[in-house]
Amino acid sequence: MNKIVLSLLLFLAFANGNAQIVKPVKWTSKVEKISDTEYNLIMDGKIDDEWHMYSQFTPQADLGSALPAEFTYENAKGNYELVGKTKESPYTKKYSDVFEIDEYFFEHKVTFTQKVKIINPKLASIKAKIDYQVCKQTCINDNMKFTFQLSNKPQEIDEPVADTAAVTSFTTSEPVDSTQVKADVKPVTESPKEEDRGLLTIFFLAFVGGLAALLTPCVFPMIPMTVSFFTKQSKNPGQGKRNAIFYGVSIIAIYVVLGLAITAIFGADALNALSTNPWFNVFFFLLLIVFAASFLGAFEIMLPNSWANKVDKQADRGGIIGIIFMALALAIVSFSCTGPIVGTLLVQSASKGGIAPIVGMLGFSSALALPFMLFAMFPSWLHSLPKSGGWLNTVKVSLGFLELALAFKFLSNADLVLQLHLLEREVFLAIWIAIFGAWALYLLGKITTPHDSPIGYISVGRLSLGLLVLAFTIYMIPGLFGAPLKLISAFPPPQTYSESPTGFFGSTAPVSENGLPDGAEIGPHGLNVFTDYDKGLAYAKTVNKPVMLDFTGFACVNCRKMENNVWSDEKVLEVLKNDVVLISLYVDDKRELPKSEQHVSKITGNEITSIGDKWTEFIITKYQTNTQPFYVLIDLKEQKLNKPISYTPNIDDYLTWLNDGISKFSK
């Protein structure tokens, strides 16, 4: 009875509020019996128009992006096993300009299916929960609990206590014995233009990688040798050309089969899920460090000699089969140079998912095979090829420096996800400046590697490249002092993830004359921002200014749009800087609360275990909404100064709202 009365009171209170609890996804569930011990647990979501819910596989950007859906299946141990991974209906993929990544989401409807095998014959039901994010102009972090009855009893969908008002909150707490899994994914739906553009980019980059592989000591000298073999051993020029063309096609086929194998073994999008995992990013970092060390001359990565010997014997058979084995021999013998490039391309293309590894290998192998086919068709061109020499090792070493720089991008991804602050912006840029500076010195002949030949002079091409790399190195140096470095903005950590968010000398934005107030940190555009309500309110009382509450999220796209496009306006920024105390409360902050502050919400019935849970409960109970962004102007008695607003991309409207609330503040 008490719960009913509480729910009724909440409903009446929320109905008269300025905001409302929004629940854009309506859930149903069912159980599909496969056999006496196997069942499919099916969760169907109906998504309101204009809203979209994010897939389990949507990638995470450096400092947040859309939150992937997460599943928890309770009390699995000793009762049931999860057979495979959770499957989901096809999603849409779209590029996010805000987070600079592809995002995967569902519109209108979504279905998740988990197959289970029952171990305990007395098991009557299975409880599960999904945590997810759904967005339109605002974003909501929500969850839903399900009870799957394994008998003929009606199934339950466990709603929060105050469901009469459709109250929900986001929580990251998990039962001790829960089993958390990610899902398999079916083919994505994507507009042809977006998909084609992404695959063309992968093909182009892989093609460039293939051209780079051509200019290495393992491959370049083989071009004239192989072409001469076909032209001299063939009965007539026409046959020689046909054999060389088939040789090139065989090279392409070998590498495309490699891409097919990677896709088939791991699944079209499984590697994408791995690429967003911090531990796999650390693995990729170590892998690229090994590749870089190989290119720089520390050692050579080679496949077993026995492989090459066996393939050579097969190549001696001649005919079509012999040509295929000759192409395979090239792939094996040149592996010490091409292997690191192929490995890097597979890592990069696999992070895109789908058929990207196949397209990547097609681009790489096309560039690798093209010269063999062209020089066979036009043998006279061979005379125009530059002679082999020390310049080939220069290309190889240059690739080593590039591999080394790229490796730290993967390490940075892991550091950002884990929020370890070991590789902040200044450290990352210092490492890149050192790498590219060393590369410039190498190209200018100031340092050498073990396999370099003595040089009496520097060629014009090498000098030009050296000056270009040196100019790029100098360009990065101001980034240590706060410069945005727009040319490479996608690589280093963002400005907010740094030892000095305003630059070493505070050059990007001013701070208060007396330094940061206690409990404040540097936020967007150099604003002093509190992330704790009590500390922010206490400071507002000392300076006698109104408070602007900014309910936001790391994964809130429109929150970032407001900060980038509205807060950046000179007039708005002036008000936020001087006339209010800004308190930003992140509803998706997963850091755990102290044990003494953890509790079960009397409003939602959910466990409040994280900082994000705390602010989610706060916005629901205080302002009767669960959407972000959400802005509230309050006085020092915590009373609203005017009606709160949500996503307001019009600068004039937002400024008018700010000035209206501030004008009502009594000093």
Image (cartoon, rainbow, N blue to C red):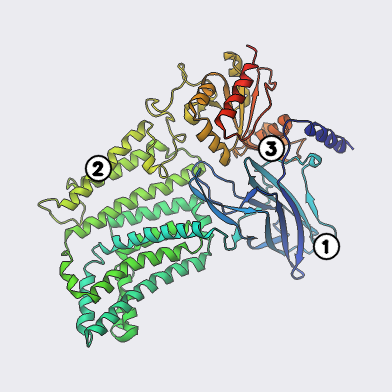
Q: Amino acid at mark 3?
A: Asn
Q: Quadrant of residue 622?
A: top right
Residue under pointer 1: 151
Say the numbered circle drawn on residue 470. Answer: 2
Q: Earlier in the sequence, mark 2 or mark 1?
A: 1
Give coordinates of residue 577: x percent, y percent.
51, 22
Instruction: Decide which of 99, 142 is in the foreground and name it.
Output: 99
Quote the CA–CA distance across marks 2 and 1. Answer: 71 Å
As drawn, the label of residue 626 is: 3
Residue 605 seen in the current view = yes
Q: Compared with residue 301, is residue 98 higher up or lower down, i.e. above or below?
A: above
Q: Please, which residue is most extreme toward the bottom here? A: 235
- Residue at (35, 84) in percent of width and height: 321
Q: Position of residue 475 (x, y in %)?
A: 30, 38
Circle number at residue 267? none
Residue under the image location 72 percent in, 60 percent down: 42
Q: Is residue 98 left or right of residue 293?
A: right
Residue at image position (30%, 77%) is: 245
Query: Considering the numbered disc 3 on the image, is that residue within a helix, a strand or a loop?
Result: loop
Image coordinates of residue 477 in percent, x first then y, are 31, 35
Q: Is residue 43 above or below residue 445?
A: below
Q: Quadrant of the C terminus?
A: top right
Which quadrant of the structure image shows residue 87? bottom right
